[in-house]
Image (cartoon, grey):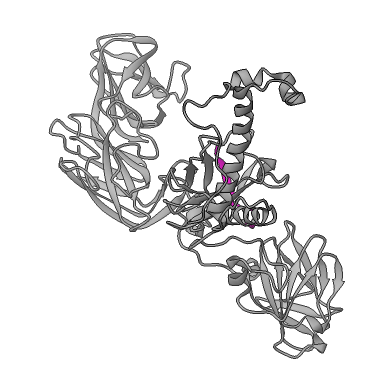
Amino acid sequence: MATNDFLPFANGGGANVLTQAQYAALTTLLSGGYQSGVANSAQMNKTWRQSSIMAAVLAQFAADYSGSNSTDDGTTATLEANLVAAIRSATKTGVILADTGAANAYTAVNAPPLVAGTWVDGVVQQVRIAHANTGASTYAPDGMTAIPIYGLGLQPLQGGELALNGIAILVRMTITSVNSGNPIAVLMECAGGAQQVAPATQIQHAAQLGQVQSYGGGFGGITPVSSTTSLTNGVSGQLIVLGASAAPTLPDVSTMTIGQSVTFTNQDSAAHTITAFGAQTIVTSGIAVPSLIVQPGQDIVLTARSSSTWTMASGSGKLQFNPVIVAPATQTQHAPQMGQVAGIVGSARNLVMNVTAAAATATLTADEIIVETALGGVRYCLPNFSKTINLATTGAGGMDAGSAPVSGYVALYAIYNPTTGASALLATNTTSAVAPSICNGAVPTGYTASALVSVWQTNASRQFAIGYQVDRTIYIANTTVLASSTAQSTPTSLSIASVIPANARSVSGSLQTVSTASANLALIIYGNTALVGQQGISSSEGAVSPMSIGFRDLPITTSQAMYYTASCNAGTPTFSIAVSSYQF
Protein backbone atom coordinates (compact mmCIF):
# COMPACT_ATOMS: atom_id res chain seq x y z
CA MET A 1 0.00 0.00 0.00
CA ALA A 2 1.36 3.41 -0.97
CA THR A 3 2.53 5.63 1.90
CA ASN A 4 2.09 9.34 2.62
CA ASP A 5 4.88 11.44 4.20
CA PHE A 6 2.76 14.59 4.46
CA LEU A 7 1.26 14.57 7.93
CA PRO A 8 -1.30 16.91 9.48
CA PHE A 9 0.04 19.31 12.16
CA ALA A 10 -1.65 20.09 15.50
CA ASN A 11 -4.63 17.85 14.85
CA GLY A 12 -4.87 16.30 18.26
CA GLY A 13 -7.89 16.73 20.47
CA GLY A 14 -6.19 19.20 22.82
CA ALA A 15 -4.07 21.00 20.25
CA ASN A 16 -3.01 24.57 21.09
CA VAL A 17 -4.90 26.30 18.30
CA LEU A 18 -7.45 29.07 17.98
CA THR A 19 -11.05 28.13 17.38
CA GLN A 20 -12.32 28.68 13.87
CA ALA A 21 -14.41 31.66 15.01
CA GLN A 22 -11.39 33.25 16.74
CA TYR A 23 -9.19 32.71 13.72
CA ALA A 24 -11.77 34.07 11.28
CA ALA A 25 -12.05 37.23 13.36
CA LEU A 26 -8.34 38.08 12.80
CA THR A 27 -9.05 39.93 9.58
CA THR A 28 -5.81 41.95 9.70
CA LEU A 29 -3.74 38.82 10.21
CA LEU A 30 -5.55 36.95 7.48
CA SER A 31 -5.06 39.78 4.97
CA GLY A 32 -1.57 40.97 5.96
CA GLY A 33 0.07 37.91 7.49
CA TYR A 34 2.30 37.74 10.55
CA GLN A 35 4.30 40.88 11.43
CA SER A 36 7.51 41.28 13.48
CA GLY A 37 7.07 40.93 17.20
CA VAL A 38 6.18 38.25 19.73
CA ALA A 39 4.55 35.23 18.08
CA ASN A 40 1.24 33.88 19.36
CA SER A 41 1.62 30.08 19.34
CA ALA A 42 -2.11 29.36 19.09
CA GLN A 43 -2.40 31.62 16.06
CA MET A 44 0.58 30.09 14.29
CA ASN A 45 -0.49 26.54 15.13
CA LYS A 46 -3.89 27.27 13.58
CA THR A 47 -2.26 28.56 10.39
CA TRP A 48 0.12 25.57 10.14
CA ARG A 49 -2.72 23.11 10.83
CA GLN A 50 -4.92 24.52 8.06
CA SER A 51 -2.18 24.26 5.46
CA SER A 52 -0.84 20.90 6.65
CA ILE A 53 -4.24 19.20 6.75
CA MET A 54 -5.04 20.06 3.14
CA ALA A 55 -1.54 19.00 2.07
CA ALA A 56 -2.02 15.70 3.90
CA VAL A 57 -5.43 15.14 2.30
CA LEU A 58 -4.15 15.79 -1.23
CA ALA A 59 -1.08 13.65 -0.66
CA GLN A 60 -3.20 10.80 0.72
CA PHE A 61 -5.56 11.09 -2.26
CA ALA A 62 -2.59 10.92 -4.64
CA ALA A 63 -1.22 7.87 -2.85
CA ASP A 64 -4.57 6.05 -2.69
CA TYR A 65 -5.57 6.52 -6.32
CA SER A 66 -2.16 6.50 -8.06
CA GLY A 67 -0.68 3.63 -6.07
CA SER A 68 2.59 5.57 -5.65
CA ASN A 69 4.10 6.94 -2.41
CA SER A 70 3.67 10.62 -1.57
CA THR A 71 7.29 11.26 -0.54
CA ASP A 72 8.53 14.42 1.17
CA ASP A 73 11.87 14.70 -0.62
CA GLY A 74 11.69 18.36 -1.55
CA THR A 75 10.69 17.77 -5.19
CA THR A 76 7.36 18.62 -6.85
CA ALA A 77 7.47 16.87 -10.25
CA THR A 78 6.82 13.38 -8.88
CA LEU A 79 4.08 14.60 -6.54
CA GLU A 80 2.38 16.44 -9.38
CA ALA A 81 2.56 13.38 -11.66
CA ASN A 82 1.10 11.21 -8.91
CA LEU A 83 -1.74 13.68 -8.30
CA VAL A 84 -2.60 13.79 -12.01
CA ALA A 85 -2.61 9.98 -12.14
CA ALA A 86 -4.83 9.84 -9.07
CA ILE A 87 -7.37 12.25 -10.57
CA ARG A 88 -7.52 10.23 -13.78
CA SER A 89 -7.99 7.02 -11.82
CA ALA A 90 -10.72 8.46 -9.58
CA THR A 91 -12.76 9.81 -12.48
CA LYS A 92 -12.80 6.40 -14.14
CA THR A 93 -14.99 5.07 -11.32
CA GLY A 94 -18.47 6.60 -11.38
CA VAL A 95 -21.06 6.29 -8.65
CA ILE A 96 -23.66 3.67 -9.55
CA LEU A 97 -27.01 4.49 -8.01
CA ALA A 98 -29.61 1.92 -6.99
CA ASP A 99 -32.96 1.93 -8.78
CA THR A 100 -35.47 2.63 -5.99
CA GLY A 101 -38.51 3.13 -8.22
CA ALA A 102 -40.70 0.80 -10.24
CA ALA A 103 -40.95 -0.42 -13.81
CA ASN A 104 -41.41 2.61 -16.09
CA ALA A 105 -41.10 5.02 -13.13
CA TYR A 106 -37.46 5.14 -12.03
CA THR A 107 -36.01 6.91 -9.01
CA ALA A 108 -32.61 6.99 -7.30
CA VAL A 109 -30.94 8.63 -4.29
CA ASN A 110 -27.77 10.69 -4.65
CA ALA A 111 -25.42 11.66 -1.81
CA PRO A 112 -25.68 14.59 -1.45
CA PRO A 113 -29.16 14.80 -3.01
CA LEU A 114 -29.67 16.70 -6.23
CA VAL A 115 -31.68 19.92 -5.97
CA ALA A 116 -33.07 22.33 -8.54
CA GLY A 117 -29.75 24.15 -8.73
CA THR A 118 -27.67 20.98 -9.31
CA TRP A 119 -30.11 18.88 -11.37
CA VAL A 120 -29.30 20.73 -14.58
CA ASP A 121 -28.53 19.92 -18.19
CA GLY A 122 -25.42 17.78 -18.58
CA VAL A 123 -25.70 15.99 -15.22
CA VAL A 124 -25.01 12.26 -15.69
CA GLN A 125 -26.69 9.57 -13.62
CA GLN A 126 -25.65 5.90 -13.60
CA VAL A 127 -28.46 3.69 -12.31
CA ARG A 128 -28.47 -0.09 -11.86
CA ILE A 129 -31.90 -1.10 -13.15
CA ALA A 130 -33.99 -3.21 -10.78
CA HIS A 131 -37.16 -3.19 -12.90
CA ALA A 132 -37.08 -3.74 -16.67
CA ASN A 133 -39.20 -1.20 -18.54
CA THR A 134 -42.25 -2.23 -20.55
CA GLY A 135 -43.02 1.08 -22.23
CA ALA A 136 -42.56 4.84 -21.89
CA SER A 137 -40.63 5.65 -18.71
CA THR A 138 -39.68 8.51 -16.39
CA TYR A 139 -36.79 9.35 -14.03
CA ALA A 140 -37.06 11.32 -10.78
CA PRO A 141 -33.85 11.50 -8.69
CA ASP A 142 -34.05 12.52 -5.04
CA GLY A 143 -37.75 13.28 -5.11
CA MET A 144 -37.43 15.76 -7.98
CA THR A 145 -40.25 16.11 -10.54
CA ALA A 146 -40.24 13.12 -12.88
CA ILE A 147 -39.05 13.78 -16.42
CA PRO A 148 -39.51 11.42 -19.40
CA ILE A 149 -36.68 9.15 -20.49
CA TYR A 150 -35.96 9.40 -24.21
CA GLY A 151 -33.64 7.27 -26.34
CA LEU A 152 -30.90 8.43 -28.68
CA GLY A 153 -33.56 8.86 -31.36
CA LEU A 154 -35.09 11.52 -29.06
CA GLN A 155 -38.34 9.59 -28.77
CA PRO A 156 -40.00 8.13 -25.64
CA LEU A 157 -38.96 4.60 -24.74
CA GLN A 158 -41.12 1.77 -26.11
CA GLY A 159 -40.14 -1.10 -23.82
CA GLY A 160 -37.07 -3.32 -23.41
CA GLU A 161 -34.50 -0.48 -23.40
CA LEU A 162 -33.84 -0.69 -19.62
CA ALA A 163 -32.73 -4.28 -18.93
CA LEU A 164 -32.88 -5.89 -15.50
CA ASN A 165 -29.54 -5.43 -13.65
CA GLY A 166 -28.13 -3.35 -16.51
CA ILE A 167 -26.47 -0.01 -15.73
CA ALA A 168 -28.37 2.81 -17.41
CA ILE A 169 -26.45 6.00 -18.21
CA LEU A 170 -28.85 8.96 -18.24
CA VAL A 171 -28.00 12.55 -19.17
CA ARG A 172 -30.36 15.41 -18.40
CA MET A 173 -31.00 17.57 -21.46
CA THR A 174 -33.36 20.30 -22.62
CA ILE A 175 -33.87 20.43 -26.39
CA THR A 176 -36.22 23.02 -27.87
CA SER A 177 -37.86 20.69 -30.40
CA VAL A 178 -38.21 17.71 -28.05
CA ASN A 179 -40.87 17.21 -25.36
CA SER A 180 -42.19 20.73 -25.99
CA GLY A 181 -38.88 22.14 -24.81
CA ASN A 182 -39.20 20.55 -21.37
CA PRO A 183 -36.33 18.58 -19.75
CA ILE A 184 -35.73 14.93 -20.63
CA ALA A 185 -33.32 12.23 -19.47
CA VAL A 186 -31.54 10.81 -22.52
CA LEU A 187 -30.64 7.12 -22.23
CA MET A 188 -27.11 6.87 -23.62
CA GLU A 189 -26.87 3.12 -23.05
CA CYS A 190 -27.96 0.25 -20.81
CA ALA A 191 -26.23 -3.12 -21.00
CA GLY A 192 -28.66 -5.80 -22.13
CA GLY A 193 -31.27 -3.29 -23.28
CA ALA A 194 -32.38 -2.41 -26.78
CA GLN A 195 -30.87 0.80 -28.17
CA GLN A 196 -33.09 3.45 -29.73
CA VAL A 197 -31.71 5.29 -32.75
CA ALA A 198 -32.93 8.03 -35.06
CA PRO A 199 -34.21 6.97 -38.52
CA ALA A 200 -31.32 6.14 -40.82
CA THR A 201 -30.80 8.60 -43.69
CA GLN A 202 -27.37 7.44 -44.86
CA ILE A 203 -26.16 3.96 -45.81
CA GLN A 204 -23.75 3.69 -42.85
CA HIS A 205 -26.35 4.75 -40.28
CA ALA A 206 -27.94 2.28 -37.88
CA ALA A 207 -31.46 1.57 -39.12
CA GLN A 208 -34.59 1.37 -37.01
CA LEU A 209 -36.37 -1.99 -36.95
CA GLY A 210 -39.41 -0.38 -38.57
CA GLN A 211 -37.25 0.75 -41.49
CA VAL A 212 -35.71 -2.68 -41.95
CA GLN A 213 -39.05 -4.51 -41.77
CA SER A 214 -40.70 -1.98 -44.06
CA TYR A 215 -37.98 -2.05 -46.67
CA GLY A 216 -37.72 -5.82 -46.61
CA GLY A 217 -34.06 -6.14 -47.56
CA GLY A 218 -30.92 -4.40 -48.65
CA PHE A 219 -30.65 -1.62 -51.20
CA GLY A 220 -27.98 -0.49 -53.58
CA GLY A 221 -28.17 2.96 -52.02
CA ILE A 222 -30.45 5.51 -50.42
CA THR A 223 -31.40 8.64 -52.35
CA PRO A 224 -33.28 11.44 -50.55
CA VAL A 225 -35.63 13.45 -52.78
CA SER A 226 -37.07 16.77 -51.63
CA SER A 227 -37.90 18.58 -54.86
CA THR A 228 -39.27 18.12 -58.39
CA THR A 229 -36.78 15.56 -59.71
CA SER A 230 -36.48 13.42 -62.83
CA LEU A 231 -34.94 10.08 -61.88
CA THR A 232 -32.68 8.01 -64.14
CA ASN A 233 -32.16 4.26 -64.46
CA GLY A 234 -29.31 4.63 -61.97
CA VAL A 235 -31.84 4.41 -59.14
CA SER A 236 -32.56 0.76 -59.90
CA GLY A 237 -32.36 -1.22 -56.66
CA GLN A 238 -32.21 1.93 -54.54
CA LEU A 239 -34.42 3.30 -51.80
CA ILE A 240 -35.87 6.72 -52.65
CA VAL A 241 -36.70 8.64 -49.46
CA LEU A 242 -39.42 11.22 -50.12
CA GLY A 243 -39.01 14.41 -48.11
CA ALA A 244 -40.64 17.83 -48.10
CA SER A 245 -41.68 19.07 -51.58
CA ALA A 246 -40.73 15.75 -53.19
CA ALA A 247 -42.28 15.28 -56.67
CA PRO A 248 -40.21 12.68 -58.55
CA THR A 249 -40.70 11.54 -62.12
CA LEU A 250 -39.85 7.88 -62.74
CA PRO A 251 -37.01 6.90 -65.01
CA ASP A 252 -37.83 6.15 -68.65
CA VAL A 253 -38.88 2.52 -68.15
CA SER A 254 -37.57 1.64 -71.61
CA THR A 255 -34.05 2.22 -70.27
CA MET A 256 -34.64 -0.27 -67.43
CA THR A 257 -34.16 -4.04 -67.51
CA ILE A 258 -37.50 -5.83 -67.11
CA GLY A 259 -37.81 -6.88 -63.47
CA GLN A 260 -35.66 -4.10 -62.04
CA SER A 261 -37.30 -2.27 -59.13
CA VAL A 262 -37.22 1.03 -57.31
CA THR A 263 -38.52 1.40 -53.74
CA PHE A 264 -40.05 4.63 -52.46
CA THR A 265 -40.74 5.49 -48.83
CA ASN A 266 -42.53 8.62 -47.65
CA GLN A 267 -41.05 9.83 -44.36
CA ASP A 268 -42.64 13.26 -44.70
CA SER A 269 -45.84 14.41 -43.02
CA ALA A 270 -47.46 15.17 -46.39
CA ALA A 271 -48.47 12.95 -49.30
CA HIS A 272 -46.29 12.99 -52.43
CA THR A 273 -47.02 12.17 -56.07
CA ILE A 274 -44.86 9.90 -58.23
CA THR A 275 -45.34 10.49 -61.97
CA ALA A 276 -44.49 8.15 -64.86
CA PHE A 277 -42.13 9.37 -67.58
CA GLY A 278 -43.85 10.89 -70.63
CA ALA A 279 -46.89 8.84 -71.70
CA GLN A 280 -45.79 5.79 -69.71
CA THR A 281 -48.07 4.35 -67.02
CA ILE A 282 -48.07 2.60 -63.66
CA VAL A 283 -50.31 -0.49 -63.37
CA THR A 284 -51.95 -1.25 -60.03
CA SER A 285 -54.84 -3.65 -59.48
CA GLY A 286 -55.17 -3.96 -63.24
CA ILE A 287 -55.60 -0.22 -63.79
CA ALA A 288 -53.03 1.86 -65.68
CA VAL A 289 -52.53 5.35 -64.24
CA PRO A 290 -50.05 8.13 -65.13
CA SER A 291 -49.20 8.83 -61.48
CA LEU A 292 -49.90 7.68 -57.97
CA ILE A 293 -49.81 9.14 -54.47
CA VAL A 294 -47.71 7.82 -51.58
CA GLN A 295 -49.27 8.71 -48.24
CA PRO A 296 -47.15 9.63 -45.15
CA GLY A 297 -45.49 6.56 -43.68
CA GLN A 298 -46.19 4.37 -46.72
CA ASP A 299 -43.75 2.66 -49.02
CA ILE A 300 -44.17 1.16 -52.51
CA VAL A 301 -42.06 -1.01 -54.79
CA LEU A 302 -42.34 -0.27 -58.54
CA THR A 303 -41.02 -2.88 -60.97
CA ALA A 304 -40.30 -2.43 -64.70
CA ARG A 305 -43.00 -4.48 -66.44
CA SER A 306 -42.52 -3.54 -70.10
CA SER A 307 -40.93 -0.82 -72.18
CA SER A 308 -43.87 1.47 -71.37
CA THR A 309 -45.29 0.37 -68.02
CA TRP A 310 -44.36 -0.04 -64.36
CA THR A 311 -46.25 -2.30 -62.00
CA MET A 312 -46.77 -1.74 -58.28
CA ALA A 313 -45.26 -4.97 -56.93
CA SER A 314 -45.61 -4.51 -53.18
CA GLY A 315 -45.45 -2.12 -50.26
CA SER A 316 -47.91 -0.69 -47.77
CA GLY A 317 -48.92 1.95 -50.31
CA LYS A 318 -50.48 -0.79 -52.42
CA LEU A 319 -53.21 -1.24 -49.85
CA GLN A 320 -54.97 1.96 -50.94
CA PHE A 321 -55.72 0.27 -54.27
CA ASN A 322 -56.77 -3.16 -52.97
CA PRO A 323 -59.33 -4.44 -50.44
CA VAL A 324 -57.73 -5.57 -47.20
CA ILE A 325 -58.98 -8.47 -45.09
CA VAL A 326 -58.75 -7.56 -41.41
CA ALA A 327 -59.67 -9.24 -38.15
CA PRO A 328 -62.68 -7.86 -36.26
CA ALA A 329 -61.84 -4.53 -34.64
CA THR A 330 -61.65 -4.66 -30.85
CA GLN A 331 -60.67 -1.03 -30.21
CA THR A 332 -62.22 2.19 -31.52
CA GLN A 333 -59.09 3.05 -33.54
CA HIS A 334 -58.81 -0.37 -35.23
CA ALA A 335 -59.82 -0.89 -38.86
CA PRO A 336 -63.32 -2.46 -38.73
CA GLN A 337 -64.72 -5.17 -40.94
CA MET A 338 -67.54 -4.03 -43.23
CA GLY A 339 -70.00 -5.99 -41.10
CA GLN A 340 -68.99 -3.92 -38.07
CA VAL A 341 -69.58 -0.59 -39.79
CA ALA A 342 -73.31 -0.93 -40.50
CA GLY A 343 -76.15 -1.44 -38.03
CA ILE A 344 -77.56 0.10 -34.87
CA VAL A 345 -77.08 -1.50 -31.46
CA GLY A 346 -79.95 -3.90 -30.77
CA SER A 347 -81.14 -4.00 -34.38
CA ALA A 348 -81.98 -7.51 -35.53
CA ARG A 349 -83.41 -9.39 -38.50
CA ASN A 350 -86.26 -11.91 -37.96
CA LEU A 351 -85.92 -11.92 -34.17
CA VAL A 352 -88.44 -14.28 -32.53
CA MET A 353 -89.14 -15.50 -29.00
CA ASN A 354 -92.18 -17.63 -28.24
CA VAL A 355 -93.42 -18.57 -24.74
CA THR A 356 -96.53 -20.75 -25.13
CA ALA A 357 -96.76 -21.63 -21.43
CA ALA A 358 -95.27 -19.91 -18.39
CA ALA A 359 -91.73 -21.23 -17.88
CA ALA A 360 -88.32 -20.25 -16.52
CA THR A 361 -86.69 -20.93 -19.88
CA ALA A 362 -87.15 -19.49 -23.36
CA THR A 363 -85.24 -19.46 -26.64
CA LEU A 364 -84.58 -16.33 -28.70
CA THR A 365 -83.53 -16.62 -32.34
CA ALA A 366 -82.53 -14.11 -35.01
CA ASP A 367 -80.83 -14.12 -38.38
CA GLU A 368 -78.42 -11.54 -36.96
CA ILE A 369 -78.13 -9.10 -34.05
CA ILE A 370 -75.94 -5.99 -33.71
CA VAL A 371 -74.11 -5.61 -30.37
CA GLU A 372 -71.69 -2.89 -29.22
CA THR A 373 -69.11 -2.37 -26.48
CA ALA A 374 -70.69 1.00 -25.69
CA LEU A 375 -72.89 3.52 -27.45
CA GLY A 376 -70.70 4.66 -30.31
CA GLY A 377 -68.17 1.94 -29.44
CA VAL A 378 -66.94 -1.11 -31.30
CA ARG A 379 -69.75 -2.89 -33.16
CA TYR A 380 -70.18 -6.63 -33.88
CA CYS A 381 -72.75 -8.54 -35.93
CA LEU A 382 -73.84 -11.89 -34.47
CA PRO A 383 -75.21 -14.14 -37.27
CA ASN A 384 -77.54 -17.12 -36.84
CA PHE A 385 -78.27 -16.24 -33.23
CA SER A 386 -80.15 -18.91 -31.25
CA LYS A 387 -79.74 -18.88 -27.47
CA THR A 388 -81.72 -20.15 -24.50
CA ILE A 389 -82.21 -18.16 -21.31
CA ASN A 390 -82.96 -19.74 -17.91
CA LEU A 391 -84.24 -17.35 -15.23
CA ALA A 392 -83.50 -19.91 -12.51
CA THR A 393 -79.71 -19.64 -13.04
CA THR A 394 -77.12 -16.83 -13.02
CA GLY A 395 -74.32 -15.96 -15.41
CA ALA A 396 -74.23 -16.28 -19.18
CA GLY A 397 -77.57 -17.83 -20.17
CA GLY A 398 -79.26 -16.75 -16.94
CA MET A 399 -79.82 -13.78 -14.63
CA ASP A 400 -76.90 -11.39 -14.21
CA ALA A 401 -77.26 -11.68 -10.43
CA GLY A 402 -79.87 -12.76 -7.90
CA SER A 403 -83.32 -14.05 -8.76
CA ALA A 404 -85.84 -13.05 -11.37
CA PRO A 405 -88.47 -10.60 -10.08
CA VAL A 406 -91.93 -11.65 -8.90
CA SER A 407 -94.59 -10.26 -11.27
CA GLY A 408 -92.14 -7.79 -12.73
CA TYR A 409 -90.03 -7.46 -15.88
CA VAL A 410 -86.66 -8.74 -17.07
CA ALA A 411 -84.52 -7.20 -19.80
CA LEU A 412 -82.80 -9.69 -22.08
CA TYR A 413 -79.42 -8.83 -23.58
CA ALA A 414 -77.46 -10.53 -26.33
CA ILE A 415 -73.89 -10.56 -24.99
CA TYR A 416 -70.68 -11.30 -26.90
CA ASN A 417 -67.07 -12.19 -26.03
CA PRO A 418 -64.81 -10.90 -28.87
CA THR A 419 -61.84 -12.94 -27.64
CA THR A 420 -63.52 -16.34 -27.72
CA GLY A 421 -66.36 -15.58 -30.13
CA ALA A 422 -68.88 -16.86 -27.56
CA SER A 423 -72.36 -15.33 -27.35
CA ALA A 424 -75.25 -15.79 -24.94
CA LEU A 425 -78.35 -14.22 -23.44
CA LEU A 426 -78.27 -12.42 -20.09
CA ALA A 427 -81.30 -11.29 -18.05
CA THR A 428 -81.45 -8.30 -15.68
CA ASN A 429 -84.24 -7.12 -13.37
CA THR A 430 -85.79 -4.03 -14.95
CA THR A 431 -89.07 -3.88 -13.05
CA SER A 432 -88.53 -0.38 -11.72
CA ALA A 433 -86.22 1.17 -14.30
CA VAL A 434 -85.70 1.61 -18.01
CA ALA A 435 -83.22 -0.95 -19.31
CA PRO A 436 -80.36 0.73 -21.26
CA SER A 437 -79.41 -0.26 -24.80
CA ILE A 438 -76.06 -1.63 -23.53
CA CYS A 439 -76.11 -3.92 -20.50
CA ASN A 440 -74.92 -2.22 -17.32
CA GLY A 441 -75.52 -5.20 -15.05
CA ALA A 442 -73.09 -7.87 -13.82
CA VAL A 443 -71.89 -9.00 -17.24
CA PRO A 444 -69.73 -12.19 -17.17
CA THR A 445 -65.99 -11.66 -17.68
CA GLY A 446 -64.94 -11.29 -21.30
CA TYR A 447 -68.40 -10.41 -22.63
CA THR A 448 -67.59 -6.82 -23.54
CA ALA A 449 -70.31 -6.21 -26.16
CA SER A 450 -74.08 -6.39 -25.65
CA ALA A 451 -77.45 -5.19 -26.89
CA LEU A 452 -80.96 -5.06 -25.46
CA VAL A 453 -83.12 -7.54 -27.40
CA SER A 454 -86.21 -8.04 -25.22
CA VAL A 455 -88.12 -6.77 -22.16
CA TRP A 456 -90.46 -9.50 -20.92
CA GLN A 457 -93.01 -9.84 -18.13
CA THR A 458 -92.58 -12.37 -15.31
CA ASN A 459 -95.33 -14.03 -13.24
CA ALA A 460 -95.68 -14.68 -9.53
CA SER A 461 -93.44 -17.76 -9.88
CA ARG A 462 -90.57 -15.74 -11.41
CA GLN A 463 -91.25 -17.29 -14.81
CA PHE A 464 -91.70 -15.83 -18.27
CA ALA A 465 -95.34 -14.94 -18.83
CA ILE A 466 -97.03 -16.24 -21.99
CA GLY A 467 -96.16 -14.11 -24.99
CA TYR A 468 -94.76 -13.93 -28.50
CA GLN A 469 -92.09 -11.51 -29.75
CA VAL A 470 -91.30 -10.47 -33.32
CA ASP A 471 -88.39 -8.03 -33.62
CA ARG A 472 -89.24 -5.33 -31.01
CA THR A 473 -92.95 -6.03 -30.63
CA ILE A 474 -94.14 -8.31 -27.83
CA TYR A 475 -97.65 -9.75 -27.98
CA ILE A 476 -99.23 -10.73 -24.67
CA ALA A 477 -102.49 -12.33 -23.57
CA ASN A 478 -105.24 -9.71 -23.93
CA THR A 479 -105.38 -8.03 -20.51
CA THR A 480 -108.02 -5.58 -19.25
CA VAL A 481 -106.47 -2.45 -17.73
CA LEU A 482 -109.71 -0.43 -17.33
CA ALA A 483 -113.28 -1.47 -16.53
CA SER A 484 -115.10 1.62 -15.24
CA SER A 485 -118.55 3.18 -15.22
CA THR A 486 -117.18 6.64 -14.42
CA ALA A 487 -117.21 9.29 -17.11
CA GLN A 488 -114.05 11.41 -17.54
CA SER A 489 -114.43 14.74 -19.31
CA THR A 490 -110.70 15.58 -19.42
CA PRO A 491 -107.73 13.31 -20.24
CA THR A 492 -107.20 11.11 -17.21
CA SER A 493 -104.02 9.13 -16.50
CA LEU A 494 -104.32 5.33 -16.46
CA SER A 495 -101.43 3.23 -15.13
CA ILE A 496 -100.74 0.17 -17.24
CA ALA A 497 -97.53 -0.86 -15.40
CA SER A 498 -99.03 -4.31 -14.80
CA VAL A 499 -98.86 -5.14 -18.50
CA ILE A 500 -96.10 -3.04 -20.10
CA PRO A 501 -92.52 -2.36 -18.91
CA ALA A 502 -90.83 1.00 -18.46
CA ASN A 503 -89.10 0.47 -21.82
CA ALA A 504 -92.42 0.36 -23.74
CA ARG A 505 -92.65 3.09 -26.38
CA SER A 506 -96.13 2.28 -27.73
CA VAL A 507 -99.04 0.01 -26.91
CA SER A 508 -101.85 -1.70 -28.83
CA GLY A 509 -105.11 -3.30 -27.73
CA SER A 510 -108.89 -2.76 -27.82
CA LEU A 511 -111.65 -0.44 -26.52
CA GLN A 512 -115.24 -1.34 -25.63
CA THR A 513 -118.28 0.69 -24.54
CA VAL A 514 -121.72 -0.49 -23.37
CA SER A 515 -124.68 1.00 -21.41
CA THR A 516 -127.77 -0.35 -19.69
CA ALA A 517 -129.87 2.02 -21.83
CA SER A 518 -129.75 3.30 -25.36
CA ALA A 519 -127.15 6.05 -25.30
CA ASN A 520 -124.46 8.01 -27.06
CA LEU A 521 -121.13 6.71 -25.72
CA ALA A 522 -117.50 7.71 -26.34
CA LEU A 523 -114.15 6.30 -25.12
CA ILE A 524 -111.08 8.15 -26.43
CA ILE A 525 -107.41 7.35 -25.59
CA TYR A 526 -104.35 9.60 -25.86
CA GLY A 527 -100.57 9.54 -25.43
CA ASN A 528 -100.66 12.55 -23.11
CA THR A 529 -102.89 15.40 -21.90
CA ALA A 530 -102.11 17.33 -25.09
CA LEU A 531 -104.23 14.71 -26.95
CA VAL A 532 -101.23 13.26 -28.85
CA GLY A 533 -102.00 10.04 -30.77
CA GLN A 534 -105.76 10.27 -30.25
CA GLN A 535 -107.72 7.07 -31.03
CA GLY A 536 -111.13 5.92 -29.83
CA ILE A 537 -114.73 4.94 -30.23
CA SER A 538 -117.82 7.22 -30.38
CA SER A 539 -121.25 5.74 -31.22
CA SER A 540 -124.96 5.56 -30.53
CA GLU A 541 -125.72 2.17 -29.00
CA GLY A 542 -128.78 0.28 -28.02
CA ALA A 543 -129.26 -0.94 -24.49
CA VAL A 544 -126.77 -3.65 -23.56
CA SER A 545 -125.30 -3.61 -27.09
CA PRO A 546 -121.48 -3.33 -26.65
CA MET A 547 -119.34 -1.65 -29.29
CA SER A 548 -115.66 -2.67 -29.65
CA ILE A 549 -112.76 -1.31 -31.66
CA GLY A 550 -109.05 -2.00 -31.77
CA PHE A 551 -106.33 0.60 -31.28
CA ARG A 552 -102.74 0.38 -32.44
CA ASP A 553 -99.37 1.91 -31.54
CA LEU A 554 -100.59 4.48 -29.04
CA PRO A 555 -97.42 6.40 -28.05
CA ILE A 556 -96.29 6.09 -24.44
CA THR A 557 -95.01 9.52 -23.44
CA THR A 558 -95.31 8.95 -19.70
CA SER A 559 -93.67 5.75 -18.49
CA GLN A 560 -96.20 2.87 -18.20
CA ALA A 561 -99.24 5.17 -18.53
CA MET A 562 -101.88 6.20 -21.06
CA TYR A 563 -104.70 8.79 -20.95
CA TYR A 564 -108.43 8.54 -21.70
CA THR A 565 -111.75 10.39 -21.68
CA ALA A 566 -115.17 8.69 -21.40
CA SER A 567 -118.80 9.90 -21.75
CA CYS A 568 -122.34 8.48 -21.76
CA ASN A 569 -125.70 10.36 -21.85
CA ALA A 570 -128.05 7.58 -20.57
CA GLY A 571 -128.03 4.49 -18.40
CA THR A 572 -125.11 3.02 -16.55
CA PRO A 573 -122.07 2.71 -18.82
CA THR A 574 -119.10 0.36 -18.75
CA PHE A 575 -115.89 1.60 -20.33
CA SER A 576 -113.22 -1.05 -20.99
CA ILE A 577 -109.60 -0.88 -22.23
CA ALA A 578 -107.50 -3.97 -22.88
CA VAL A 579 -103.81 -4.26 -23.89
CA SER A 580 -102.57 -7.01 -26.22
CA SER A 581 -99.06 -5.87 -27.28
CA TYR A 582 -96.33 -3.30 -26.80
CA GLN A 583 -93.22 -2.13 -28.58
CA PHE A 584 -89.96 -1.20 -26.86
Is residue 149 in the magenta section?
A: yes
**Can I make out residue 226 in this image?**
yes
- Identify the residue at horizontal 59%, vertical 22% (top origin): 20
Q: How many marks?
A: 0
* Viewer-closest of 536 and 376: 376
Q: Is residue 400 above or below residue 205?
A: above
Q: Is residue 541 above or below residue 102?
A: above
- Identify the residue at horizontal 48%, vertical 55% (top origin): 340
**Can I make out residue 157 in this image?**
no
Going by the image, does 473 lie left or right of 197? left
Is residue 39 in the magenta section?
A: no
Outermost residue, bottom direction? Answer: 257
- Dividing the picture into quadrants, the one containing residue 482 is top left
Outermost residue, left direction? Answer: 461
Percent x, y of residue 256:
78, 88
Q: Quadrant of the C terminus?
A: top left
Percent x, y of residue 442:
29, 39
Outermost residue, front direction? Answer: 38
- Dividing the picture into quadrants, the one containing residue 485 is top left
* Viewer-closest of 66 and 72: 72
Q: Is residue 534 above or below residue 565?
A: below
* Viewer-closest of 95 and 166: 95
* Viewer-closest of 222 and 495: 222
Q: Is residue 65 above or below residue 308?
A: above
Going by the image, does 452 lie left or right of 237? left
The secondary structure making up most of the magenta span is: loop
Read off the magenta span: 146-155
Percent x, y of residue 259:
69, 88
Percent x, y of residue 42:
59, 23
- Identify the residue at horizontal 48%, vertical 63% (top origin): 192
- Identify the residue at horizontal 52%, vertical 32% (top origin): 11
